[in-house]
Amino acid sequence: MGERPVATTLASELAPDELACLLDEAQKANRGGRFLEIGTAAGGTLCQLINCLPADRRPPIVVVDPMAYFRNQLEAVRTNLTRHGINPDTVDFRVGTSAAAFPRAAAAGEQYDFILVDGAHKSVPVTQDLRWTRLLRPGGVVCFHDYCDAFKGVKWNVDRLVRRHPTYRLEKVVSHLAVVRKLSESPTPEGGTLDLIWAGLLSPLLQWERSYRKRRAGSKGC
Ligand SMILES: C[S@@+](CC[C@H](N)C(=O)[O-])C[C@H]1O[C@@H](n2cnc3c(N)ncnc32)[C@H](O)[C@@H]1O
């Protein structure tokens, strides 16, 4: 097995219009509950997210990431935060997949006002990410990055969430960022067993379709 690459950038992976939208939603969602980022890369968006919130009213920030995206990922994120004037010890890092980290958060009764989903983009892991929306307080917002045809695992999950749960509303899409609001508690669990079964069945099909399209277009997608 080859060595993991090093970080190529400490900047946000979001486009400027996506980032502006995300920060605006984050400021509006700051109502005392936790904030969560699933998938942080080098913490570029995380730094912007934290610094857009007033220092005296910053919510607890949770980051869930296996920290194996590149070599010394957690160290790079901590350095990035420090460079942005943020004490990395104020961020609650949970090293692992969102699926592995969820049961403990749920058992602890954690409540969130804002979630950014930007982890693994295949259908099954995104369905697992969706479970965290069970902890989102009504009125809270969940944003999904890479909501576009090139990442059908993301798109399929977001579309299915709002279709199957009228308690969620797709408010806007800015470039490849989807903003979804939770209107009230859902009577059925988000990212449930049936969703996972469908995601698992769909996964090989979407993967095949993606590699076919990439081969034909010779492009990297969105
Ligand atoms: C696209 S990058 C995130 C970019 C970052 N949000 C930004 O805007 O700069 C994807 C991240 O998801 C993480 N990741 C991959 N699988 C994951 C999973 N199952 N749960 C949580 N994070 C995951 C990777 O380690 C990587 O850091």
Image (tube, helix red, strand yellow):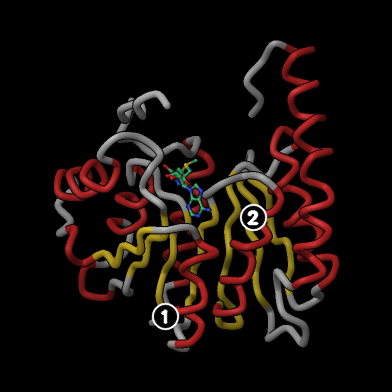
Q: Residues within 10 Å of mark 1 (few under 14, many from 20)?
A: some
Q: Position of residue 22 (x, y in %)?
A: 49, 53
Q: Position of residue 206 (x, y in %)?
A: 79, 38
Which residue is drawn at the image coordinates 26% and 64% (left, top)? Answer: 91
For the residue pair 86 and 20, the one nearer the viewer reads as 86
Sequence-first tag of 1 and 2: 1
The image quadrant where one finds the N terminus is top left
Q: Residues within 10 Å of mark 2 (few under 14, many from 20)?
A: many
For the residue pair 55 and 14, the one nearer the viewer reads as 14
Q: Position of residue 145 (x, y in %)?
A: 58, 47
To which residue does mark 1 refer? 33
Label for residue 217? none
Q: SS of the residue at dot 2?
A: helix
To which residue does mark 2 refer? 126
Disc number lying in front (1 or 2):
2
Horizontal side, residue 55 vs residue 196: left or right? left
Q: SS of the residue at dot 1?
A: loop
Q: Position of residue 201 (x, y in %)?
A: 84, 51
* Residue kind at label 1, given as amino acid type: Gly
The count of marks equals: 2
Which residue is drawn at the image coordinates 35% and 35% (left, top)? Answer: 70
Horizontal side, residue 89 vs residue 147: left or right? left
Choose top left, top right, bottom left or bottom right for residue 23. bottom left
* Residue kind at label 2, given as amino acid type: Val
Placement of 35 over or under 8, stated as above or below: below
Horizontal side, residue 186 vs residue 139: left or right? right
The image quadrant where one finds the C terminus is top right
Which residue is drawn at the image coordinates 45% and 79% (left, top)? Answer: 104
For the residue pair 222 and 71, the one nearer the viewer reads as 71
Which residue is drawn at the image coordinates 38% and 47% (left, top)? Answer: 45
For the residue pair 102 and 48, the one nearer the viewer reads as 102
Placement of 83 over or under 71, stated as above or below: below
